Each structure stands twice: as structure tokens, then as C-alpha cells.
Image: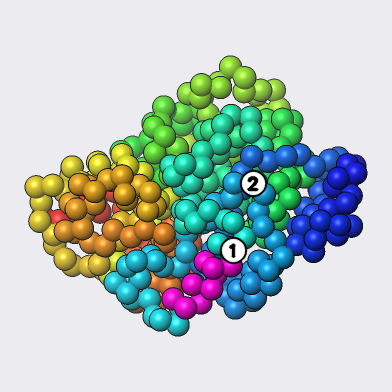
Amino acid sequence: MHLTKQEERTLSGEEGFGRQKAMELVVALGEIYRAKRLIPITSAQISGASFKTIGDAGIKFLEDFSHEAKVSVRASLNPLGLDERRWQSMGVDKKFFDKQARIISAYKSMGVELLYTCTPYLAGNRPRQGQHIAWAESSATVFANSYLGAMTNREGGPSALAAAVIGKTAEYGLHLEENRRPRVRIDIKVIPDGMVPLTGYLVGKLAGKRVPFVNGPSMSEDEHKSFGAAMAAAGAVSMYAFSDSKRRKSTNTSQIEERLSIDARDIQDCADGLKGDDAWDLVAIGCPHCSPSELRTMARALKNRTPRKKSDVWFCTSRMVFARCPKEVAVLRKFGNVLCDTCMVVAPIESSYRRTASDSGKAMVYLPTLGKQKASFRSTKQLLEAISR
Ligand code: F3S
């Protein structure tokens, strides 16, 4: 891989140990994927923020690295294992809180923006079409590539952090136009009400590692958010093209090698398979984190209803969206906990709950594994009906 003189200096350690280590990691990835050069990035998004997912080894790495390194481009952080202000109401213990605090402090000292969300694009870090970025969170990566038209690989936490420190990433994968061309076309005639996440889940299963071209009904930004998140979790998809995109004319479909379809029956079968049972002890909404319009829609639906209180309820969002929606938050709080900074997957829910219902296709992948939960899929509407009367 060609490195400029400046990059060689960084690699040789002339600019300090932290930048050297970051450069080594980015260059090593570039060599593995046969990148020809490094390219500048406009932002990074770093995963590996919850103590639950990175553990003591992660804390040690971050604390050591934070003594040496600072980010040089805008870099925002994924959700934590707790809500920094409401952690006690989540059943999180002090030991976990203290470990989480050390992680926050390490990221803070490196200059990482403490957004604590998987939807940074709703909290000020919204890349523009054509910009190269290094994002790690899978749901944010697929959204940035597909809906926003930015260009990123699905980074790991350490590689996104390393890219943030040197302000560059290696040019391979989805940073190259030729790898962004769809290889499989998936036709979808109709998506039943509330089933967008499961349709994304099915697309992910069918596409595997390929970029799919989704020829289907028009979707809102919020729907793309949950559609892509489920797709990235169910498959290894980090980008999809879609038929109602404003970029439609520029989608190059010449390399499509297979044509598949998803019909209403497939979606219903998927819903039946993920239905679980009704005996849940937590209802968790907001994977990915709720947008202002999602909070608004739910608050409107619940406004004239009363809580049923059969289970705990979490509405997960970012603190920026929370702050922008005080009226909606006030309504939702009558029905459950409105949490910021965290979610049902990266929080240690297994210490308090065993069965969780969610409207998220991504959560259906991770609740049973990372969360050790019996998971039940329901549409948002069904969940709101279940928690109210
Ligand atoms: Fe976000 Fe947590 Fe889901 S990080 S995408 S709410 S698993």
C-alpha cells in the first residue's frame, strides 16, 4: 500500500506512540484487504462503549490507549450499558456503573463526542452523500451507506477509533464504487403494517454478504432505519440499494447475478417464527434508538390510554432526541422508562429480565444471544396495545 511521507512519519512514531499504533492498525487492515492507499474521513462512529460488551480487557485497552491518543476528526460514541442519569431505575448495579464510568472517561479524554447513540445521524453527526467515514455500529453503517449515500465499511470498535485518531481509513470495500454495486435483486410487492423490520431481516438472510437491490414499496426515513438495522444483523449486509431512492438513476444494476423475491407469506412466516409467547417481563422499543417522529407517533397513540403495568417497558432513544421531545417523553413516561444512552441489547438486562418483547428485527437477533432473553417479536402497534388499555 502506498503511504505518503506524512503517513510514513506517523507510522514510524515521529508523531507519538498513540498515532503510531492507530496507523499500524489501519495499515494492517489495508494490507489484508489490498487497499492501495489511505483516504481522509470526515467522521468516525465508535462501538465498544458498553462494559457488558468490552469487559475488563476492553477497559484496560482504552485506558492505556487514551494516555497516548486523541481523535483528529469528529468521532461519536455508541450506546453504553446504562443510562448515565437513570441507571438505578434500570436495575444496574454500582459495580457495573463504576466500570462504565472508566470507559466513558477514557473516551472523553481522547476527545470522542459522548453522543451514546447508534443513531448519530439524528444527533448532529449526519454525513453527506459521497463522504468517506469510518463507522462501526452496524445499523448506523448500513443507514449511512444506503440512505445517506456516505461511504463506510462496517468497522470494528478499535479500527473506527484508530481511523478517528489518524483521520484516515484504508480505501477498500465499500469505499470503492465498484463494491457498492448490487449483486442480488430482491423484489418485494407489499410490506404488511408493522413488518418493515422483519422484511429487512429476511433481506439480510437472503443477501448474506452481497449488496442487495431492494425493489419494493417506498419507505420513510424511520422505516429505512429499522429495515437496514435488521438486515445488517440477520446478514452481513452493510449496504443496500433501493428502488425509491433519489439516487435510483445512478444505481448500477449490471452486476446483479440473482433475482429473488419476498412475498407477504414469507413475512408472515418470519413473524410466526419470531412470535415467541405473551409472557414477557420487559417490552423494549427503540432499536435503533427512537427518532423524534417515532416518539411523537407513540405518544399520540398512548395519549388517551392508561398503563396496563403487566411488564416493565423501556423506550430507548438518544439524549438529544429526548431533549427535543419533552411533551412526548412526558406521555411515554406514564407507561414505562424513557431511557437515553443505552438499549436492551448492550445493557445488562439479563440480570433483571428473562423474556423480552420488541418491535425490532435487530433485537430479535441479539436479545437471545447477547441478552440471554426469550424474545418475542410484535409490531410497535401491538406492543403499545399490550402496555395500555
Ligand atoms: Fe442501537 Fe442497541 Fe439496537 S445499539 S441498533 S438500540 S442493539
| Disc 2 residue: CB within 8 Å of ligand 1 | no
Q: How many marks?
A: 2
Q: Residue at x 80, y 61 (%)?
A: 16
Residue placed furthest toward the bottom? 95
Q: Is residue 133 above or below residue 50?
A: above
Kindly identify which residue carries mark 1.
Answer: 109
Whether the magenta-drawn stretch holds residue 103 is answered as yes
Residue 297, x across and y down, in percent? 24, 41
Mark 1 surroundings: few (<14), some (14-19) or many (≥20) residues within 10 A: some
Label ID, residue 94? none
Label ID, residue 73? 2
Q: Which residues are magenta?
A: 97-107
Q: Residue at x 33, y 37 (%)?
A: 192
Q: Are marks 2 and 1 in contact (CB under 8 Å)?
A: no
Residue 182 visible to an observer of this rendering? no
Q: Nearer the viewer, residue 66 or 53?
A: 66
Q: Residue at x 53, y 29 (%)?
A: 242
